[in-house]
Amino acid sequence: MKTAIIWPKETFIPNSLYKRYVFMGEVASSLEAYGEVKVLDLSVTNVSKRFLAEFVSGCHYIFMPVEVTTVREAVYITEYIRNYSKAKIVVYGTAPIYNPNFFARYFDIVVSTGYWTEILPLIASEQIDKLDINGKLYKLKSVAKELNWYYPDFSKLPMDEYIKISKGEVDLSVQIGCPFDCSFCSEKILHPHGIFVQRPVDNIINFINTYNFSDVFFDATTFTVDRKWVLELAEALVKNEKKIRWRTVTRVDQLDDEICEAISKAGCYQIGLGIETLTSSIQKDIHKEIGKHIMVGISCLKKYHIEPRLFFILGLPSQSLSDVNAALDFVKMQNFKSRWKEYIPLRETSKFTTFDQYDSYRADQFFMHFVEGMDRETYMRVLLKNERN
Ligand code: SF4
């Protein structure tokens, strides 16, 4: 069986790669038991028409991760590929999950939940008895409590480009699912059935000892929620001879002295915290009421010399210029690292029926949700200045 994974082209070079390592790198490893797997990331690799035609020729399946920002590109590239390949084109990723019937118009198979490293190998090996199939929509019949964990296949990823973008850091997924349900987040939709699991500690240590990377981003939803796992991992990292520098993300209300001390000793140098907004009424609207925990959690990190990195969202419903300025001032006064991202209400995409609706979510159409009192230039500058630092 010959398969290929193709990431559609984006307008801009990505500044975050965790989806590439997980959606493509770990997926590639999960497929390898069933034959040849190739990976092509068109958002960082420019290829000729001839190259692409040869790349897809002879493939039985082409797997394509699609985000809400790349819907049109995914359809265009699929139309081109169909001239040179009889492969079945399988879409997965965040966008198809919210609106599988829209994607069924253009692709052969639509994976309508997450768990890609479980379901894509079943599709590639045509084990259809394990799949719940409804027309073109495919999902797992049942989700096992213990999932398979794969390492990204670095040999297949465009690592020269990725390492330049991430300045030497690589990503490893260590957690799937989330016990919380913030209104703007896709985690519960990607991983339904209440699943919340961690990569086994010995599997993480084996990764560190197998690959020659000294900087790792542990891709998590809320890294510190499962205390037992966090403390076991921290202990194993301390005992392990090979040391790494690592960072991750968690909720600010899931930090305390014991956890912060343990992960600091284990090499954690930075934690990303989704603050989103400082306004309590908006926190309530987005189901993330963390107000009273913000300074407590941040102080705890600083006490153990872990750098907090704060994430905010621009364009939240009922957000005003004063809310944005309060957050900018807070970050500036405390000299915190921060990142702002435009609000992407993924749940609304479930009602989309046209490409034009998806176009408003493209990465080159930032100004999608106005902030009262904020002009376009200021809005764009907040996004650009605070993109990644
Ligand atoms: S805590 Fe984080 S991962 Fe969990 S639902 Fe909220 S935003 Fe998503």
Image: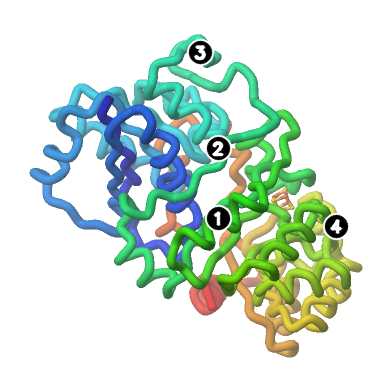
- What scheme was used to colour the molecule? rainbow
Tell me where residue 114 appears, x and y as whole percent. 56, 34
Residue that carries the numbered disc 1 in the rendered image: 206
Above or below, 158 against 88 in this view is below
Question: Who comes first in sequence, dot 1 or dot 3?
Answer: 3
Residue type at mark 2? Thr
Observer-side mark, 3 or 2, equals 3
Secondary structure found at label 3: strand
Q: Quadrant of residue 62?
A: top left
Observer-side mark, 1 or 4, equals 1
Question: Who comes first in sequence, dot 1 or dot 2?
Answer: 1
Above or below, 58 against 360 in this view is above
| Crowd class of label 4 (few under 14; some 14 to 19; many from 20; radius 10 Å) | some
Tell me where residue 322 appears, x and y as whole percent. 74, 75
Observer-side mark, 1 or 3, equals 1
Near-viewer residue (218 or 239): 239
Near-viewer residue (11 or 161): 161
Query: Does residue 377 appear in the picture of this structure?
Result: no
In contact (CB < 8 Å): disc 2 and disc 4: no
Residue that carries the numbered disc 3 in the rendered image: 133
How far apart are labels 2 and 4 at the CA level? Answer: 25 Å
Q: Mark number for residue 382?
A: none
**At 55% across and 55% down in the image, what residue appears?**
206
Q: Is residue 163 left or right of residue 23?
A: left
| Crowd class of label 2 (few under 14; some 14 to 19; many from 20; radius 10 Å) | some
Question: Who comes first in sequence, dot 4 or dot 3?
Answer: 3
Residue that carries the numbered disc 4 in the rendered image: 289
Q: Quadrant of residue 346?
A: top right
**At 25% across and 57% down in the image, what residue appears?**
45
Quadrant showing the N terminus? top left
Secondary structure found at label 2: helix
Residue that carries the numbered disc 2 in the rendered image: 349
